[in-house]
Image (cartoon, rainbow, N blue to C red):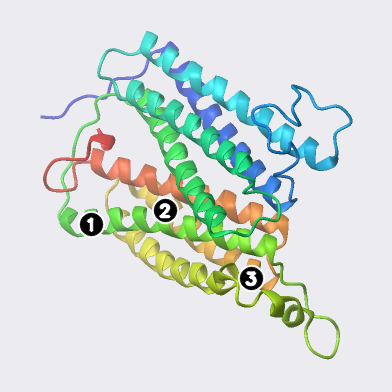
């Protein structure tokens, strides 16, 4: 039997707008964090956290201190907004509502994001540090940001949806495993991308000099054996395979009417990300392009999460739906 959708109230729409603004702000903070890495400003506040140079407000700060301190302030504001999110959700929505669950998870992941940032600073895994420990933490940091943006996205969706009717589909058994595989693949490719971006920052490849051997070759010889340099090929290879899978998934999901808009965006962003990645390699990873590449990666991830959520809400897969999709 069909269930008529329930329109959200005015208060719920305001909550949804707030959650959407928080999601957009989180994307800006994430990109800002990459700018801190690109500019080598991660040590701008020294080993002090949450203070900066041992002070609440640093006096006579350097450029690196200004950048790092500004990032901490922006992150702190996201923490306050994330704290307000579940408080508002618990006052507005009934017990068991998905908006409650996802708002709490968003707050937890924001706190974890801050903890990882503190770990990097307190252990000096910033600036010119090229250790394996930093690479691992940076990869985990990026995975946490994906979980965070997914949680914030699903908070927005949960706040605005009513009881949607379920439809059936003929090949859910084929698409569901592919969808899960693409989501996992996006996380893996993003983690390797974070490590590759770290290598591009610490061991930049300059543009070839006019005539004679390239400057890139001479610049890389001293660091040729470093694992960050040797891993450079891993990310683009994985990314190419993922784009093929994502485009194939988008084509399959487009046959489900309620999922088609998200599927089209997913396919378009996957192709755009492939182009940006290729240009990024050709131009030797300039900072502005790294930021664009990161932002599109986050948007690609969000589109995949929305497609997955809409797919399971449509009732296409056989068997029970995952708890996060309810």
Does the image show residue 156? Answer: yes
Q: Which residue is mark 3?
A: 281
At x 19%, y 47%, the residue is 316
Q: Which residue is mark 2?
A: 187
Q: How far apart are labels 2 and 1 at the CA level?
A: 16 Å
> For the residue carrying disc 2, how many other residues have a C-alpha within 10 Å: few (<14), some (14-19), or many (20+)?
many
The reply to whether discs 2 and 3 touch (Cβ–Cβ < 8 Å) is: no
Q: Quadrant of residue 47?
A: top right
Pick whichever, 172 or 289, lies toward us: 289
* Residue 275 image offset from top left, x and y in percent: 57, 66
Q: Secondary structure at mark 3?
A: helix
Q: Is residue 244 above or below residue 256?
A: below
At x 62%, y 58%, the residue is 198
Q: Secondary structure at mark 1?
A: helix
Q: Is residue 71 left or right of residue 14?
A: right
Q: Which residue is mark 1?
A: 177
For the C terminus, the quadrant is top left
Pick whichever, 212 or 294, lies toward us: 212
Kindly report which numbered mark, 2 or 1, lies closer to the viewer in this rendering.
Answer: 2
* Residue 106 image offset from top left, x and y in percent: 43, 29
> For the residue carrying disc 1, how many other residues have a C-alpha within 10 Å: few (<14), some (14-19), or many (20+)?
few
Q: Looking at the image, which residue sits at the far bottom?
A: 212
């Amino acid at each position: 039997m069909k269930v008529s959708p329930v329109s959200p109230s005015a208060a719920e729409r305001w909550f949804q707008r707030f959650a959407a603004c928080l999601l957009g702000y989180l994307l800006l903070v994430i990109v800002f964090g990459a700018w801190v890495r690109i500019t080598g400003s991660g040590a701008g506040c020294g080993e002090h956290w949450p203070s900066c140079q041992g002070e609440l407000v640093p006096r006579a700060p350097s450029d690196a201190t200004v950048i790092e301190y500004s990032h901490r302030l922006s992150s702190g504001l996201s923490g306050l907004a994330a704290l307000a999110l579940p408080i508002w959700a618990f006052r507005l929505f009934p017990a068991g509502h998905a908006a409650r669950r996802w708002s709490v998870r968003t707050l937890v992941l924001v706190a974890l994001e801050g903890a990882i940032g503190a770990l990097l600073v307190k252990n000096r895994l910033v600036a010119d540090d090229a250790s394996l420990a930093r690479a691992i933490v940076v990869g985990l940091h990026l995975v946490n940001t994906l979980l965070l943006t997914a949680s914030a996205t699903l908070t927005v969706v949960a706040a605005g949806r009513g009881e949607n009717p379920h439809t059936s589909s003929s090949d859910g058994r084929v698409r569901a495993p592919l969808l899960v595989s693409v989501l996992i693949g996006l996380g893996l490719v993003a983690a390797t991308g974070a490590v590759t971006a770290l290598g591009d920052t610490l061991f930049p490849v300059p543009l070839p000099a006019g005539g004679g051997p390239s400057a890139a070759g001479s610049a890389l010889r001293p660091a040729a054996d470093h694992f960050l340099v040797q891993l450079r090929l891993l990310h683009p290879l994985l990314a190419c395979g993922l784009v093929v899978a994502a485009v194939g998934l988008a084509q399959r999901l487009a046959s489900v009417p309620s999922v088609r808009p998200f599927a089209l965006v997913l396919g378009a962003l996957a192709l755009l990300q492939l182009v940006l990645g290729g240009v990024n390699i050709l131009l030797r990873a300039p900072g502005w392009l790294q930021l664009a590449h990161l932002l599109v990666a986050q948007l690609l991830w969000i589109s995949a999460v929305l497609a997955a959520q809409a797919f399971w809400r449509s009732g296409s897969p056989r068997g029970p739906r995952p708890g996060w999709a309810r």
